[in-house]
Amino acid sequence: MTKPMSFARRTVILAALALPVLVQPALAADPAETFVAQNIAKGLTLLNNKTLSKEQKRDQFEQFLLGLTDLKRIADFTLGQYRRTAPPTDVTAFEGAFRDYAVAVYQSYFSKYAGQTLKIVNTTQRAPTDYIVTTQMIDPADRSGRPPLEVDFRVRTDGPRPVVVDVSVAGVWISLEQRDQFVAFLGQNNGNVKLLISHLAELAKQFKS
């Protein structure tokens, strides 16, 4: 018997990768910051395009997301040590299931952030091709006086184009938490990646419906 997983609750925050928001960029001093600023603007244009049908917007949104992130790299990372021991066919199937799951989650939840402002604050270079772009999500309707929600994007520039490989919301790195939860799930189920694939597929159906 598989144990219910709680990672769906956290993953919905990954919709921050494609927020339908206004962007207040700082001076773009590096490729990672420029990449984040430009692509958030592209996401805004797409999500606010009222001339597209639901199906067209879904298809274009998926392509936008795939251009912004490296879902294969993220999927492999979240398998932890099971990435090395799982059969190659299971790893490939998991990468596909993770992609469908992530896209379904983003599409389901992005509208929750409509009308908010994403402000780029600064960028920290962790290594020659590894950056953290720090942003703040500002809700113009919030009168609570609380500080803005911080959303950080980890961007790698070691490939043919920059890509987002992780997102931190209020200090929680999503891919790291997913890895912990996926590895715990697999540990409870004898490393059976097929069971994890089935669970992700079921969650994707729920979000799509």
Image (tube, rainbow, N blue to C red):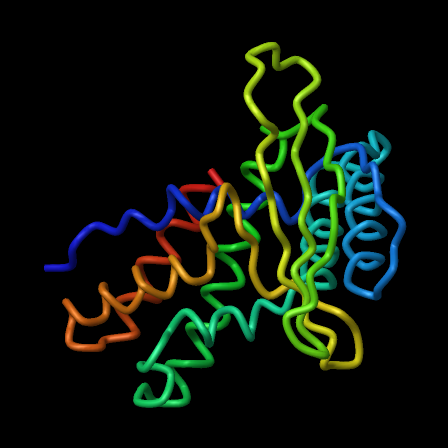
- Residue 67 pos. (x, y %): 74, 63
Q: Looking at the picture, how far across and down is residue 106, in whole percent?
A: 57, 45
Residue at the image point whose x is 77% and y is 46% from the top: 40
Quadrant into which the N terminus falls: bottom left
Q: Residue at x 71, y 52 (%)?
A: 59
Q: Give 61 or 120, whichever is nearer the viewer.
A: 120
Residue projecting furthest to the left: 1
Q: Is residue 179 left or right of residue 113?
A: left
Give the percent coordinates (x, y) of residue 194: 29, 73
Residue pictured at 79% horizontal, 74% vertical: 161
Q: Check the image and name the residue furthest to the top.
A: 143
How many numbered dots are placed on residues in this image?
Answer: 0
Instruction: Say whether residue 207 is left or right of residue 198.
Output: right
- The relative height of residue 94 versus residue 46 in the rendered view (above or below) is below
Find residue 140 and report its horizontal and vertical position in percent: 70, 17
Residue 113 placement: quadrant: top right
Q: Is residue 180 left or right of residue 153?
A: left
Q: Nearer the viewer, residue 96 or 144?
A: 144
Residue at screen point 84% across, 39% down: 45
